[in-house]
Structure formats: C-alpha cells, structure tokens
Image (cartoon, rainbow, N blue to C red):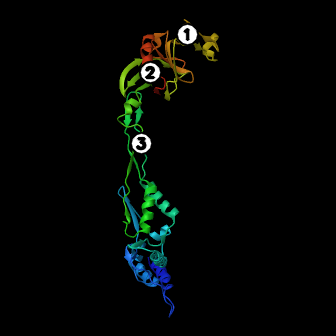
Amino acid sequence: MRRFAFAMLASFLLLVPSAGAAEPRIAAGVTVAGTDVSGLTLSEAAGRLYNTFGFKVGAPLSTHVAGRKRAVLPKDLGFVFDANKSARRAYNAGQQPHTAVVDVPLYTSYDKAKVAAYAAKVAANVKREARDARVDIKVSKIGKVASRDGRRIDADALAASVGAALGDPTLPRIFTPKLQVVRPKVTTAGLAKAYGTIVTIDRGNFKLRLFKGLKLSKTYRVAVGMPAYPTPTGRYTIANKAVNPAWTAPNSPWAGAYANETVPGGSAENPLKARWMGIVNGVGIHGTGAPGSVGTRASHGCIRMTVPDVVDLYPRVPVGTPVLIGN
C-alpha cells in the first residue's frame, strides 16, 4: 500500500503547474465515479480523486465461497489507478456540450491474464468432481458405493466481477459466486437400473449367483475348471450368447482327435450342451452332458451347468452383463 501511495503522490506532483501558468479548469456538471470535480483545475481534480479513491482502489479484494476465503491485492493483479488521467478524462468530457451532469469512470487498468489466473485458481480450489454411484461386487453379495454431487463456480463470471470492481470503487470488493451443483451420471437411486443383471461365480462353493436389481435372484450349482485347467478369476462381462452352439476344439492334447475341429451344435459329441454364454478366452457358461460333474472341479476352464439350469439362466442374462469369478 505504501508503494502504491508513493507512486500516486509522485504522479500527482507532476500536475502541479509552474509559476504563472494558467491551468485549465473542468467545466461545471462533471463528476468522476460520482465525485464532483466541477470548476477544479486538473491538478486540483487529480488531488481530490487521489484523496477520495487512492485508498479504496488499493484495498484488497476477496472471494468467499464454499466456506473458503481467498484475498488478493490489486497490485498483484497488475492494477494501476491514474488520478491525472482521470482528471484529464473529466476535463475532456466537460468540453462536450451537456445539459445534465456528466459522470466519467476512473482511469484504471489491470492485467486481464492475472485476473483470469486468480479466478481460475479460486475455481480450482472450490471444484469437486461428481462421483458416480457404483457397485461393489462380491461373489455372495452386491454392495453399493453412494454417488456424490460435484460443485464448481463460473471462473469467467468471477473474473468479470473482479475486473468490474477494480474499475469502479463503488462496487463490492467481496465476491460470493454461486456454487453450481454438478450431478453424477449414475445416482445411488439409479444404481439398480444401471446394473440390472449381475452374475457371480463362486469357484470354492461351486455356485453361480444371479442378481437382479442388486438383489439375489437365483443360485445354481456349477462345475468349474480342474486344477490343471482352472477357471480364470476376475471381473468380466458376458461377451456373446448362442443356442446349441457349435464347438471348435482347441489345439490342445485334451481335445484328442477333435483338436482344431468344429463339432456342430446339438451333436452328441459336442460338449457344449443347449446354451452358451461366452466370457473370456474361450471360457464360458454352458450346459453339460455329464450332470454328475456339477459341484466338482471337472472342466477345462468353463463353468458347467445342468441342461435345465442353463436353459433357465440363458434368457435372464443379456450380453454385457458383468461377471465376477472369485475363489
């Protein structure tokens, strides 16, 4: 503030006329930011404006939002108040014909980039991203992680308010920008709809659980991969579906004479009975011709079900359904 005052005083002294010089006077009916300077010389007007506004325009500005305050000094925004040029502006305005009071603004300037940076910093400090609700899938139950509203402020609008206050000492220097609520795309209330169907495979207990609307709908007994060909664990989705699918045997010793051969759907030699729901890398859910293997580690990685059960499950599980395979 002292540096600002000294600079203003030095600028004001430049207006003091030399002895004997006739200094022009401002016409009647002219004000600067509401302060009457009618009939004053330029130096007198500059002095009045400096005394009236010098302290006000150098006072800090502050933004109050979301329980936080961030102050800034005008000089840190590149602000300059020129009393001399303000007086000259009043003089020039008075030279034009007028019948009513003419009010002119103070002559001020500031660094728009610095004001924008201040507003952006305030906005970044306040901003909170919205959080979508999500499911916490476990093999035996489905948990929920609640959604949360986000928030933000309009940084451009704040910058405009700061700029206006720097140029007009009558405007408030405390800003209270409105918090804008940012809604999540998936709310807690909408979570059940977003995850209408979920399938989990409990390898240790040989169970397939079907969840509808995040609630357990049905439980089925299954077979899973034998120790040499374990069913993979992890989070997947149902990638494809088929009724009486063909079976293309892998190029693996366990496929025997069928290696790299395709067995038509519905064939007695086809191990994929009735229905197929593909998951990942050739692993899927299918019916079996060996119902006695259900409840054991018997497959080459797939999830086996009895034919009645896989036929029952099939229409309940659309493509894209999340699948969690756990131990």
Asked if residue 277 shows in the view, the reply is yes
SS for dot 2? loop
Name the spot of residue 111 as percent of width and height, x first: 51, 66
Residue 60's place in the image compared with 326, above or below, is below
State left or right for residue 210 relative to residue 277.
Answer: left
Nearer the observer, 168 or 249:
168
State left or right for residue 267 relative to residue 306.
Answer: right
* Residue type at tag 1: Gly
* Residue type at tag 3: Arg
Please give the residue where the numbered disc 1 appears in the rendered image. Answer: 265
Please give the residue where the numbered disc 3 appears in the rendered image. Answer: 131
Upstream in the sequence, badge 3 or badge 2?
A: 3
Q: Residues within 10 Å of mark 2 (few under 14, many from 20)?
A: many
Identity of the residue furthest to the top in this view: 268
State left or right for residue 320 relative to residue 191.
Answer: right
Work out how far the residue at label 3 is from the one at label 2, CA to CA, in angstroms: 28 Å
SS for dot 1? loop
The residue lying at 43 percent from left, 11 percent from top is 308
From the viewer's perspective, is the residue at label 1 or at label 3 nearer? 3
Residue 236's place in the image compared with 110, above or below, is above
Please give the residue where the numbered disc 2 appears in the rendered image. Answer: 317
Report the quarter where the N terminus lies.
Answer: bottom left
Nearer the observer, 249 or 11:
11
**Splitting the image into 4 quarters, where does residue 211 fall?**
top left
Name the spot of residue 224 as percent of width and height, x first: 49, 19
Upstream in the sequence, badge 1 or badge 2?
A: 1
SS for dot 3? loop
